[in-house]
Image: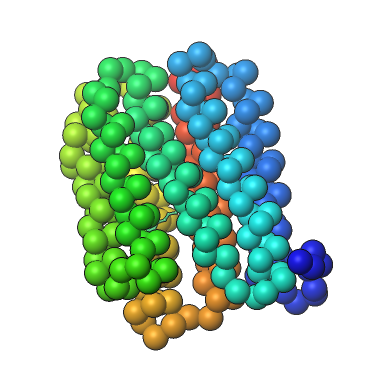
Amino acid sequence: MTNNLVSGDYVGMSFWLISMALVAATAFFFLERDRVAGKWKTSLTVSGLVTLIAAVHYFYMRDVWVATGTSPTEFRYIDWLLTVPLLMVEFYLIMSAVGKVPARVFWNLLGGTTLMLILGYMGETGSMGVLPAFVLSMAAWLYVIWYIIKGEASRVNASLANVHVQKAYKTMTLLVTVGWAIYPIGYFMGYLGGGADPGTMNLIYNLADFWNKIGFGVVIWAAAVADSE
Ligand SMILES: *C/C=C(C)/C=C/C=C(C)/C=C/C1=C(C)CCCC1(C)C
């Protein structure tokens, strides 16, 4: 594989930029563990693991893009399969830092997101029709949204009476609903809406990952620091 970025390859450059931002974010979250109270350390560890896993995948994804100009779908899904459930589990972790949370909240968040991604992958790779895979994957995503806005997770959050956690929970919910919407829109455009060029798709996914992985971690970090002081 060639490793050269050519001038004008803005998609390739976005892969490179996000890779480096993810590396820096990983160092930041791991180092900042020292600054927060013990009960918050797991949340920051998981934020750092998300950006670490994503950074390594981005190195490979960039190579695929630069060498072939095609979408690195396999690497993207492997990355998502590891990082998305970890991001979702953060809802459980931040609430657990300040109160008692039933274990099934953890399993529901983990299960809902894992199902969403497996269905999406089956649609993208042809082991299931693109439309039924989209519909079922959307249902799993909407279930997760319902669960954090109206379901048990939201009730646990409301009972905690911790302003820092509640503020973080609210922003994280916004990212999961608005920020994450970019991915199904991309899938829809690519497979059901007449096709989209791979350059645009990857640029959009890369920018989305920046907010949804690094931004998500920063929100948790801010709550952890505020609550520790
Ligand atoms: C860091 C990566 C993140 C936060 C990725 C999130 C991905 C999704 C929310 C994907 C969702 C999908 C649907 C809801 C339906 C179509 C198939 C997917 C997998 C693109």
The answer to whether residue 78 is left or right of residue 111 is right
Q: Looking at the picture, does residue 109 appear above or below residue 211?
A: above
Image coords of residue 193 (percent x, y): 36, 82
* In this rendering, position of residue 1 left or right of residue 220: right
Point 34% across, 25% down: residue: 95
Rendering coords of residue 148 (x, y %): 26, 41
Quadrant of the rendered image containing residue 151: top left
171 or 192, nearer to the observer: 192
Residue 200 is at least partly visible in this image:
no
Residue 120: quadrant of the picture: bottom left
Q: Which residue lies furthest to the bottom in this view?
A: 194
- Residue 102: give x, y in percent of width and height: 24, 23
User: Looking at the image, in which quadrant does ligand 1 appear?
Assistant: bottom left
- State the residue at coordinates (67%, 74%): 68
- Image coords of residue 122 (percent x, y): 36, 63
Q: How many labels does the image show?
A: 0
The residue sitting at 58% across, 48% down in the picture is 54
192 versus 82 height, above or below:
below
Relative to the observer, which residue lies in front, 88 or 67?
A: 67
The residue most toward the top is: 38
- Which image quarter is the N terminus in? bottom right
